[in-house]
Amino acid sequence: MRGRPAVSTGAELTSMAGFMSEALAQSTISPRREVAEIAALPSTHASFKWLQSHEREWLQQQIEVVKVPSAPFEESARAEWLRNHLSGLGLQDVRIDAVGNVLGIHPGTDPDSARVALSAHIDTVFPVGTPITPREEDSRILAPGIADNGAGLAALLAIAATLQATKSAHRADILFILTVGEE
């Protein structure tokens, strides 16, 4: 990790958010211009094309992650499932911290660049024992937790897979933070 401590506590996350805000405030390029420049890159177009061509796979990942129970304070099975999947998608330093959050890094090319954090919560509002049987109905997937937060978790898996498949280079480290205890 190029000498920087891993992020794993609320205090560290707050400190990192402050650092990132300060770095963005000192940027000499406007956010609108930076987004436009990134959107125009051939690698960005290739990433979107790859992602779209695998859309059915991400829907299947969403269904699979929802099948793993994750009631509040009972997130360990889903955390382990996510850790295994993120490890297979080329992230570095993938681990479950002492609280149960899943953390991983897709390293950037500039060790001095501010980090970017992508986050989704692991738990669902549904109690232990809630039957979870996803089903398709009129081109929709129905299941407890399929949207909140199966969709967010599937999106992070899809982003990690896209970065791996397209070998996209980016300056900043991208931190994947999948948190427990949101509900």
Image: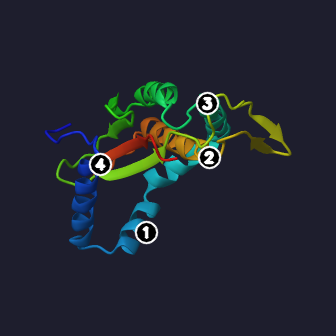
Along the line of sight, the residue nearer the viewer: 16 or 35 = 16
**According to the image, label 4 marks what residue?**
10
Question: Which residue lies at the image location 24% right of the left edge and 48% below the top edge?
Answer: 12
Considering only order in the chain, which callout, 4 or 2, is on the residue closer to the N terminus?
4
Count of marks placed on residues: 4
Along the line of sight, the residue nearer the viewer: 105 or 111 = 105
Q: CA distance from mark 2 to mark 3?
A: 35 Å
**According to the image, label 2 marks what residue?**
52
Tell me if 180 is positioned left or right of 148 in this view: left
**According to the image, label 1 marks what residue?**
36
Considering only order in the chain, which callout, 2 or 1, is on the residue closer to the N terminus?
1
- Name which residue type carries label 2: Gln
Q: Residues within 10 Å of mark 2 (few under 14, many from 20)?
A: few
**According to the image, label 3 marks what residue?**
128
- Inspect this view and state whether residue 114 appears: no
- Name which residue type carries label 4: Gly
Along the line of sight, the residue nearer the viewer: 109 or 126 = 126
- Inspect this view and state whether residue 125 appears: yes
